Image (cartoon, helix red, strand yellow):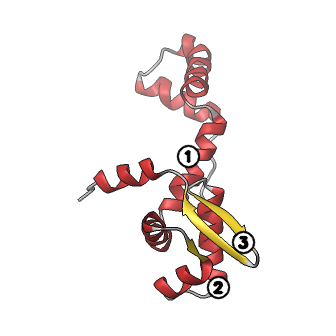
Amino acid sequence: MESKAVTSGERLARLIESGRCPPSDAPEYANELKRVAEEVADVQIVEKQSRVFKALADETRLRILWLLEVRELCVCEVMVALDLTQPTASHHLGLLENAGLVKARKEGKWVFYRVTNPNLMEKMHRMNLL
């Protein structure tokens, strides 16, 4: 089966059929919805939040954060603690750093990482999801 892309006109037609908006106001209603979407979500903030949530959506990266909450660690220490290869540890740390969750500090050949926001870690501890 082929999936057919739904056009914006078809979406608007669905709104009209459902009674969500009268046919005469449909274009104005569509513009209003777009304005609301722009007002409630700043694109840059949403992009930043998306990076953070993607970084938090991995068990290994969460474990790294919990380790770094205890103390600053070098990549080698993270590798040993979680039984990771150097490329894997560096990949995860890079994603956490890109999301702004950890900060790197170079000392000679060594790179040490720490949590950038201890308050976030405190909030995560309080989040008992289940």
Q: In which quarter of the image is the N terminus?
A: bottom right
Q: Observer-nearest residue: 110 or 67?
A: 110
- Label 3 sits on residue: 107
Q: Which of marks 3 and 1 is in front?
A: 3
Amino acid type, callout 1: Gln
First in sequence: mark 3 or mark 2?
A: 2
Q: Residue at x 48, y 14 (%)?
A: 22
Question: Can you tell which of label 3 and label 2 is closer to the viewer?
Answer: 3
Q: Can residue 2 be seen in this view?
A: no
- Residue position for label 1: 49
Kindly indicate whether the residue at mark 2 contacts the one at mark 1 (C-beta within 8 angstroms). Answer: no
Image-quadrant location for residue 97: bottom right
Q: Quadrant of residue 62?
A: bottom left
- Seen as rendered, the residue at the extreme right is 108
Check disc 2 and report the residue beneath it.
Answer: 86
Amino acid beneath label 3:
Glu
Q: Nearer the viewer, residue 30 or 25?
A: 30
Q: Which residue lies furthest to the front in this view?
A: 108
Tag 2's secondary structure? helix
Work out which residue is located at the far top of the displayed protein and give it: 24
Task: Work out whether mark 1 precedes mark 2 in sequence or the reverse, and give the earlier one.
Answer: 1
| Residue 36 shown left or right of residue 130 in the figure | right
Question: How far is disc 3 from disc 2 in space, using C-alphas?
Answer: 18 Å
Residue 76, x across and y down, in percent: 60, 84
